[in-house]
Amino acid sequence: MTPNPKSANRGATVLWVGVLAVVVVLGVVAVVLARGKGDDKPPIEDETSAITVTGDPLPAQTSTEDPAIGETIPTVSGTAVDGTPITIEPDGKAKVIVFMAHWCPHCQREIPLLAEHLAETGLPDDVEIIGVATNTATNLDNYPPTSWLDRVGWDVPTLLDSPESEAYATFGMSSFPSFLVVDADGKVVVRTSGELPVETFDQLVEAARSGQVE
């Protein structure tokens, strides 16, 4: 007896519907599991992060007497290069904050130099160093900054600035690389910029500890 073509078609249709249903269910489960794995880290888009600022921004850095000396830094929060939350704040610990742009040729020379120096000498227990990857642009050289910093061994907690470079502006910085030295009271000791020898960087660390420039 010849099978009824319509019955055969109905059977095939039911089979394919069942297969598609299983595929859809598995896809939904995969999406849910993928989301669950990333719940502990904020999303990073274009190697930047949302920035939250509490407190007054520092006045802009100038080439003459710095108006920010003695001012308390604001609190700036965002996402670090490893995807975890990070906050820069007056928290009772002296700091040297390093601002860098991935496309800046001076930064491309300075950051590996500092990374090697820090790996060899470390820091005093009462001073911390924090990086700020700022002015990030997908169409400029040496993008993305996270890959660059990992490649040169920059093992320092580093904030990803916002697309508008809000952290950079909030701290009143004006060039790259630049350095903001803060004492244990959260007050600005000195701001400087340019490619620094490691000996000069060490002097900035001591300035953070003592609260004054020697």
Image (spheres, rainbow, N blue to C red):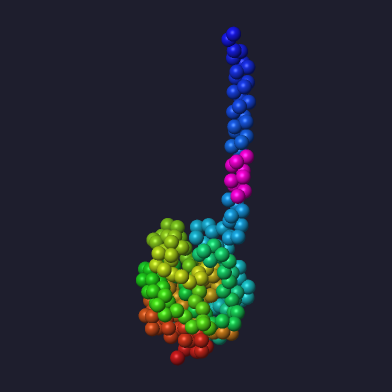
Q: Nearer the viewer, residue 88 or 176?
A: 88
Residue lying at 40% horizontally and 77% vertically, measured from the top left: 120
Q: State the quadrant of the N terminus.
A: top right
- Give the magenta range: 25-33
Residue lying at 43% horizontally and 61% vertically, measured from the top left: 147
Q: Nearer the viewer, residue 102 or 63?
A: 102
Q: State the quadrant of the C terminus.
A: bottom left
Residue reaching furthest to the top:
1
Q: Residue 117 sits in which quadrant?
A: bottom left
Residue 198 in the image: state x and y as whole percent: 38, 80
Q: Residue 75 sits in which quadrant?
A: bottom right
Residue 149 in the image: state x and y as whole percent: 43, 66
Q: Is residue 213 magenta?
A: no
Residue 133 in the image: state x and y as whole percent: 48, 67
Q: How many marks?
A: 0
Q: Please state if 7 lies on the left or on the right of 109 as rendered.
A: right
Q: Is residue 29 magenta?
A: yes
Residue reaching furthest to the front:
1
Q: Please state if 62 lies on the left or on the right of 6 as rendered.
A: left
Q: Is residue 114 visible?
A: no
Q: Is residue 128 above or below residue 14?
A: below
Residue 101 in the image: state x and y as whole percent: 44, 67
Q: Is residue 34 above or below residue 184?
A: above
Residue reaching furthest to the bottom:
214
Residue lying at 42% horizontally and 80% vertically, measured from the top left: 121
Residue lying at 63% horizontally and 17% vertically, measured from the top left: 7
Q: Main secondary structure of the magenta part?
A: helix
Q: Is residue 207 visible?
A: yes
